[in-house]
Image (cartoon, helix red, strand yellow):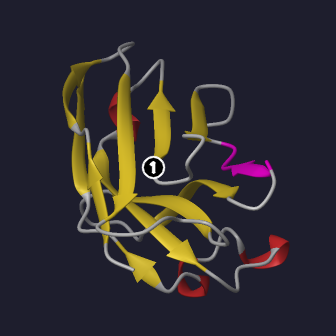
Amino acid sequence: VQLQAFGGGLVQAGGSLRLSCAPSGGTLRGYVVGWFRQAPGKEREFVAAMKMNGDSTFYSTSVKGRFSISRDNAKTTVYLQMNALNPEDTAVYFCSAGSRVINTSVRVAAAYDYWGQGTEVTVSS
């Protein structure tokens, strides 16, 4: 599965962005799709995830209540709606997909098999 992530950009603090993640072909049925981010000089960290079979969603504590992960009905695109952005949200955001991700590993990057190229989000103060 080749993933494409897009929608990043420059936004002022308090603003919103919506990121999208889509496979280059096919659907995301049966996968767990995760969003991770990596800020300069920092390790990649979990942001949010969604099980494409069912509606389970997962969020990091730093974004819960501000970010929302969703999908389209055809399960071809996963979105990350980011509201109330602050400069600490500045990072490259990656989408990922895994077929064997379980609840206890959903926040672990190594559990995912496929990764998109990343899209950069910059939040100015």
Total numbered labels placed on residues in the image: 1
Quarter of the image with the C terminus is: top left
Instruction: Name the residue at 56% across, 32% down.
Output: 67
Instruction: Name the residue at 66% across, 68% down.
Output: 107
Q: Please give left or right for residue 65 compared with residue 5 in the image.
A: right
Quarter of the image with the N terminus is: bottom left
* Camera-nearest residue between 61 and 34: 34
Above or below residue 87? Residue 5 is below
- Which quadrant of the structure image shows residue 88? top left
The span shown in magenta is: 55-61
Residue 69 within the segment the image draws in magenta: no
Instruction: Name the residue at 41% across, 24% down.
Output: 85
Task: Give the x, y percent position of residue 92.
Answer: 27, 55
> Which residue has dot 1 on it?
77
Type of the residue with mark 1: Thr
Above or below residue 124? Residue 91 is below
Q: Please give left or right for residue 52 compared with residue 85 in the image.
A: right
- Which quadrant of the structure image shows residue 122? top left
Query: Does residue 63 appear in the picture of this structure?
Result: yes
- Which quadrant of the structure image shows residue 44? bottom left
Task: Give the x, y percent position of residue 100.
Answer: 70, 86
